[in-house]
Every structure is written in C-alpha cells, then in structure tokens.
Amino acid sequence: MVRHFDYINLYKNYSQYQNLNFLDRYIHYSDFEYYLVNELSTFFKHEVIGLSESGQSIYGINLGKGSKKILIWSQMHGNESTTTKSILDVLNFIGTNSSHSFVNYLLNSCTIKIIPILNPDGANMYTRFNINGVDLNRDALNRSQKETQCFFKCLESFKPDYCFNMHGQRTIFSAGEAYKSAALSFLAPSFDYGLTINNSRGKAMKLIVSAAKLLSAYIPGHIGRYDDAHNPNCFGDYIQNMGISTVLIEAGHYKMDYKRNNVRRFVTLSLLKMIEDIAYSNIDSNSIDEYNHIPKNKKLFLDIIINNVSNSKSGFVGIQYREILNKNGIAFKPYIKSLDNLSEVYAHRYIDAYHNPITINEKSRFKIDLGIESIKILDKYVDLNIEK
C-alpha cells in the first residue's frame, strides 16, 4: 500500500533537506553549474539542453519514469532565485527518501524534467533580463532569444502534461486587502482575453487549491492569487493555450525573511503537494470555486514606514529596499519610496519617530528616491539592516 507523505514532518524538519550550498539570494551560475555536475546526487540525470546568448550551458535534470509528464522551470528571470533553491531542496528530499514508498510512487507515476536556471546570464548579472536586455517571459511568440528557443525545443520534444513556471515577486505585495504579505502567490494563467476556464486551466486551478490548503496550516492568510490578465507573449499564457495545464508560482515575502530561506520551504511543500496530486490522480478533489476565493495580490506593502515624523509634511516616510549585487552577494539598499500619507499602506517594519524630526544622511531635508546611508531620530541612529 502506498503511504502518503507526512508534510508536517517535512515542515518541522526542513533543515534536513535544505541545500546549504545556496543560502544567499544570489546564485552565481558557475557555482550552480559546478554543484550540478560534480555534487548533485547520481540518483538524478542531467543534460545540456541548449546554450544561452553568451554561450553558457542550460541544463535539464531528469527523474522518474511514469506516464504523467511534468516540466518545471525556474529563474527565467535571473534575479528570482528562491524557486531555484526550492528545486534543489526538492531534489535533496527525493534523493534522501529514494526508498520511501511515497517517493517511489511519485517517480513510478511521473516523469519529471526540470530546467533549474533558464537564464544563466541574467542569473550572473542578477537581473530580470537576459544578456541582451530581453525579458524572456515576453518572448513566447517571437522566440527571438536562444534561451527561449531552447525552452520551446525542450517543451516540444518532452510533451509535458503539466507545467510549473517558477518565479519570485517583490516585497510590495499583500494577499488581498489585509495586513498579510503574499508569502506565495499562484496563478493558473489565462489562455485568452476572456479569461475562459477550459479543462487544462481548470486543472491548474485545482492544483493550486490543493497547495493553498496545505500551506494554510502554516501561513494562514499569506497566500495570494496573481493577476490573470492575458498576455500571449508570456510563457504561461502561451503554454496554457496549447492545452497543457500550467501553474505559475511566485515566491514572495514572509515576515523579515529577505533572504527567502523560509519562503523556499513553502515553495517546496506546495510543489511536492501538487506533484503528489498529479501522481495520485487526485486533482479533481478540489474545486475551481475555491481557487476564486484565494485573495488577489495587491501592492499595499512598503519595507519600512516611519510614522509621526515632525519634519515630513505627511508625518510619514516610506522606505523600500533595492537589491544591489556586490562582491559579497546581494545588499539591500534602503531608498525613500514615499513621503505621502501612508495610513492606508502596510509595512514589514514600523518605526515610530514619536513626533520628533529625523535626519537622513545627516540632513533634515530629503526627497523621493534618495538613497539612505544613515538615519537618525533626534540624535539616535536607526539600524535599517534587514536582519534587524
């Protein structure tokens, strides 16, 4: 008898499966490539499936031998690395539990192909775009870039039944109107401008419901639904139109987890749960109506709000971090984002100035888009480090 997996145990003991080689937001592609070729378990087979615009190898990882085919790709946007790390954690989990009846059933039921980093050049530069400045997720129709051509060649030869399109989203998103950050957001991409629900899109919605139900035990209220406005140039919309059930996952922000090493755990849980539903033919146990009840993403968060500031006309200073690549990885640089009344906006961190003036970079006057080197309330410096 096949035993379903204990997700509670996986959640509690996640450190056993977390890939400790990759903990920063930045993954240098040469480090990833070395790990893939030299250290990843021989339990998995890897292959070069194409080249990037700069000539770097794009890899595919193959596992399983079942009739249900699943294609997973990550980091088509080079600065969205959280889901790549989750994929490595999933591989750790599968490799560690290769004798478990649950894992055996998944691998006997499904054939899974993973493209862990579709955009190697963007990963190195830590940018959304490839080396030519092209957003690959707007290149599905033109297929002007080698990375896009590589992907669709893989898609057409593998002929998946299900696709998982893995992304990362900014800290600005809330799950609906509530004071809840969107730790994860899901989307069953639309295949037409009418947002029609056909069989393939309906299956994607039901898979998302299953993952959301599982995650609600750990991060209740922190699951969002991404905007489903149709864009035929996007991979998910294009592939959904091919009749292939496609789920988009956006790894977001949860509490002060700026390095996303907690969020990657939620991504791993949701991905395994949806693969389980495919393997067990359990998709229809969930309903499309439940998908529509997942709150839509809203842009309601700043990273920091300083309130009761006597030398700001509104009384508020809103701060957002920018992610800057340096020799040590990713630095989170604070900038002034807003000086408006922010009483209806949320923040991941609040600082009360208690009706005192503040100085930024040793000056009492400041403006939008100013990079913050130092900040003081009266004569006391405020630490804006993300670890605070």
Image (tube, rainbow, N blue to C red):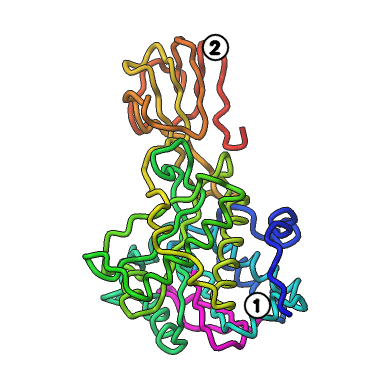
Q: Residue at x 32, y 68 (%)?
A: 234
Q: Residue at x 57, y 54 (%)?
A: 215
Question: Where residue 273 sits in the image (x, y, percent)?
Answer: 58, 66
Q: Residue at x 64, y 74 (%)?
A: 36
Kindly identify the amino acid type of the residue bearing the numbered disc 2: Asp
Left or right of 95 on screen, residue 245? left
Q: Secondary structure at mark 1?
A: helix
Question: Where residue 144 sits in the image (x, y, percent)?
Answer: 30, 76
Q: Quadrant of residue 246?
A: bottom left
* Magenta extent: 44-73
Of all residues, the one furthest to the left in this rendering is 193
Question: Where residue 316 sits in the image (x, y, percent)?
Answer: 39, 21
Q: Which residue carries the number 2 mark?
A: 379
Does residue 327 appear in this view?
A: no
Name the magenta segment's main secondary structure: strand
Kindly identify the amino acid type of the residue bearing the numbered disc 1: Val
Q: Quadrant of the N terminus?
A: bottom right
Left or right of 42 on screen, residue 117? left
Q: Residue at x 51, y 15 (%)?
A: 377
Q: Quadrant of residue 176?
A: top left
* Number of residues whose C-alpha sits closer than 10 Å to that of mark 1, classed few (under 14), some (14–19) or many (20 or more): some
Q: Is residue 217 above or below residue 334?
A: below
Q: Secondary structure at mark 2?
A: loop
Examine the structure image and report whether residue 45 is included in the region drawn in magenta: yes
Q: Which residue carries the number 1 mark?
A: 37
Q: Quadrant of the C terminus?
A: top right
Question: Where residue 97 sits in the image (x, y, percent)?
Answer: 75, 72
Does residue 338 appear in this view?
A: yes
Q: Nearer the viewer, residue 339 or 120?
A: 339
Examine the structure image and report whether residue 82 is included in the region drawn in magenta: no
